[in-house]
Amino acid sequence: MNPYLPVLVVLVFGIVLGAILSALSFFMGPKRWTKEKYDPYECGVPMVTSAAERMSVKFYLTAILFILFDIETVFLYLWAVSFHQLGWFGVVEVSVFMIILVTGYVYVLRRRALDWD
Amino acid sequence: MEQLTAQLNEVLGMFGLALWNDAFVQVVATVLKFAVLAVALLQIPPVMVWLERRAPALMQRRRGPNRVGVSLGPIKLRLYGLTQSFADAVKLIFKEEVVPEGAHKAFYHIAPIFGVFPAFLIACAIPYGPPIDVFGYTIPLSIISVDVGFLFIFAISSLAVYGVTLAGYASNNKYSLLGSLRASAQMISYEIPLGLSLIPIVLIYGTLDLNKIVMGQENFWHWGIFTAPVSFVIFFVCMFAETNRAPFDLAEAESELVAGFHTEFNSAKFAAFFLSEYVAMFVLSALCATVFFGGWQNPFISNAALASFVVGILNAPLASFGIALGAASVTNIAALIGIGVLALKAGFFMWMYVWVRWTVPRFRYDQLMDLGWKFMLPLGLANVVGTAFVLAALKF
């Protein structure tokens, strides 16, 4: 049997389960409309400004750096699986890869891209 | 009946299945196992909520919940408030669903689903015990046993970030948006050290398959905690950060951000987020137990040996009824022991979540990010290189 068949089965069941769980009170709960109830929460006062405010660019930067470093991690997994076949060759290759990676990391660090203040 | 069987076989044939061939049994088993697991996982949040009320009360020398129980006619069971949280869960279902004005409708409805299904999907990838033997069919106790285990887990766990991000974006609420930004930045930041911390494990056991990693930890001194202690430290810290739990619960720092990304979620949708949070906690606890603490294996004695010992004890009184437990029941009892052992180990880490929450104060956001990017990431990289060199020196 294809080992990915259960993945498909479970994926479908998982999404259905999530959908049912989050839709339950739409069918079970009461529905009474009052204007105030549907206001976004603002500690009890009318909304002061819109939620769509400007946000720190730091979050974007973090996301971009995440993608870079996460892909490096995935590369390392490929090497880790074949570590025993590759032997010292693999270790040296990964060390070179690490040096390049750490150089990039130090650059990011020096440019204060990871500082939150 | 025969005609029906023939028609069924024809339909199943399209998927390469036939009635009661091996693949068909496995698919049926998958559905049944998922049903059992889902029901079991649904019990986690109420019990954990109770634990999180009861445990701090005991730590702070308060009484905490000590009344609510079950009363069935004359029988009154005082369960120290345990059933209150089950009642809360039912209450949430019967609440009105309030979608705030100006919310992005589609995203608002999708977000809880994205919260729930990744957590359940990862729970399916964990091996809960050795394979069981049912009517001659060997059925593994992990629902998804793919040979890329770890990669699958990382791929799916990254999806959980979408739930958080969409929830905050869709709510049209400042607190939700800030909370979700913080939470998603934190989750993705700690995913890197989390990924790095498991590479030494792959190096040592030479596989990505969780089943094989558990099998590699048969000897007590080969447990991940002894072979890769630094990995365990990194993983343990990341466990808390990934689930947005104290001391890293900045995403829903109550004093600043109300309830974080799920401020605007109520009724069953709130329950869904709640569920996903606790299931994610359980999944990481179980993963930690599996990778670093031998999974479903006992220390010092193998499950099979323990099971045959148990069967030996049971067979003596059963013999008078003319029943003899055979090899199949040894396998199945070994599996049961395995489930129990893993539940104990995972339960310990669930307890750690509560323990740490009431012991360590909350981090500041810059401290949190510094810890992730400036300490955990270099430590993780150094750990990988260090382990590789030591292993290579020992092996080649």
Image: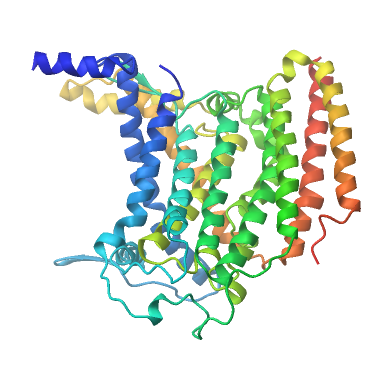
Q: Residue at x 63, y 52 (%)?
A: B187
Q: Residue at x 33, y 39 (%)?
A: B36
Q: Position of residue A98 (x, y in %)?
A: 84, 33
Residue lying furthest left: B1
Q: Give the left or right position of residue A85, taking residue B76 as reference.
A: right
Q: Is residue B47 left or right of residue B347?
A: left
Picture coordinates of residue B316, whole percent (x, y) = 27, 25
Where residue B15 appears, as percent x and y from the top left, is 33, 18
Nearest the eye: B178 or A95:
B178
| Left or right for B157, reference B310 | right
Percent from the top left, x then y, of residue B394?
A: 81, 20
Please state the total of marks drawn on the protein image. 0
B313 or A23, which is in the foreground? Answer: A23
Q: Is residue B358 visible?
A: no
Coloration mode? rainbow
Question: Could you say which quadrant of the image residue B152 lies in?
Answer: top right
Quarter of the image containing the N terminus of chain A? top left
Quadrant for the C terminus of chain A in the image: bottom right
